[in-house]
Image (spheres, helix red, strand yellow):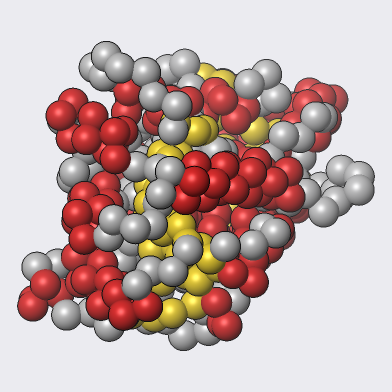
Amino acid sequence: MNIDILLPFKEKFSKNKASAVSITVKNSMKYSSFKNKIKVYGQKVEKPFYKKHFIGLKNNWILHGGHNKSLAHNYYKKNKNNDFQKKILEIHNRPYLFNYLFKKIKNIPITLHFHNDPQEMKGSKTIKEREYIAKSAAGIYFVSEFIKNKFLEGLKQKYNNIYVLYNSVERKHLIIPNKKRQVLFVGRLVPEKGAHIYTNVIKKIAKDFENWKFILIGSSKAGQEKTKTSYEAKIIKDFKSIGHNVKYLGFLDNRKVNKSISDASILVIPSIWDEPLCLVAIEGLCHASAIISSNKGGLPEVIKDKGIKLKNINEVTLRKQLVKLLSNSKLIKKYQKKAWAKYEFNSSKLTKKQDSIRLRIIKDFYLKK
């Protein structure tokens, strides 16, 4: 069985510039029993993950009416001559591309993977659009129950092609890693991620905890080295001005991010939007950091009782909880042990679930023919 994966144009399937969707696909590929049969299609990049399995597509966005539409068009053009031999096409996070390709390709099963709120995405905003996808797709994957429920909202019929498949990170530590006196924020420097909340809290408490290092990792866009927005510029300027015990590291590749989380005693996730899931939260559990986060979207599904969840996260509530942790080493260790216990997001385990679904889809689709 062959598997084609079509990524959104914004995704860069490479070590240095990958964001959450690319990282998730890369993590699952490593443990898939179909690894040698998988091809990943996306925009051309230097040094892609799994070079032998990656196909960079040309992009004629003016001719085809958009970057993503161009990728879909060129994917179809590249494969139509082989009559789409027995395979699955997995489309990530672009419902309107599912609609476009489903009308063109009828002889293979096509699945759609939602990494964001379907009600805010082109091609799945309305109940009618979501009903069409539910009736047409061989399988629909969601990164959380929260995102699945957003898709099903308003749909009256029940469907048996709906799956929740969490993002995953393989835990390689045998014991809780050695921790440093570090507090960490990792994420895009955009308002919805709450970078300003973190920065303003650190500004108020850094002098009271001079033996701690406060770290900020991220940029407004994955892989970006130059500042692009006024919000990002202000966050970086304000954070750097706090004092000697803060450090801004910019955008880091995922390997370096995981090393930083592994070192950090405390991970802060002050999101003020409904997180679809939050890969950083999973990485925090993987590396046994004490987590303080908001309670938005899919975050509670990851953190459960393993971290401190703030229902109304703001500068006052975050400052209170962070000071409480920093003042109590036993409490930090308590939440690190909670994060470590019964880890549920290993790629090896979740990829087995995905592979079993793939087999079921293939069998159901081709037996009907």
Q: Nearer the viewer, residue 83 or 249?
A: 83
| x, y percent for residue 69 | 19, 65
Q: Taking 347 as reference, is 108 left or right?
A: left
Q: Nearer the viewer, residue 87 or 332?
A: 87
Q: Nearer the viewer, residue 8 or 212?
A: 8
User: Relative to 118, is 219 above or below?
Assistant: below
| x, y percent for residue 350 | 66, 43
| x, y percent for residue 104 | 21, 61
Q: Taking 361 as reference, is 345 left or right?
A: right
Residue at point 8%, 78% (across, down) = 63
Q: Taking 219 as reference, is 255 left or right?
A: right
| x, y percent for residue 340 | 80, 34
User: Relative to 270, is 295 above or below?
Assistant: above
User: Relative to 160, is 191 above or below?
Assistant: below
Residue at point 25%, 53% (across, down) = 102
Toward which corner of the image does residue 241 lie, by quadrant?
bottom left
Q: Taking 32 as reference, is 63 left or right?
A: left
- All told, the count of numbered labels is 0
Toward which corner of the image does residue 158 lie, by quadrant?
top left
Image quadrant containing the N terminus: bottom right
Farthest residue in the right direction? 175
Residue at point 91%, 48% (across, down) = 174
Res 97 visible? no
Residue at point 55%, 38% (across, down) = 165
User: Relative to 297, is 5 above or below?
Assistant: below
Res 273 visible? yes
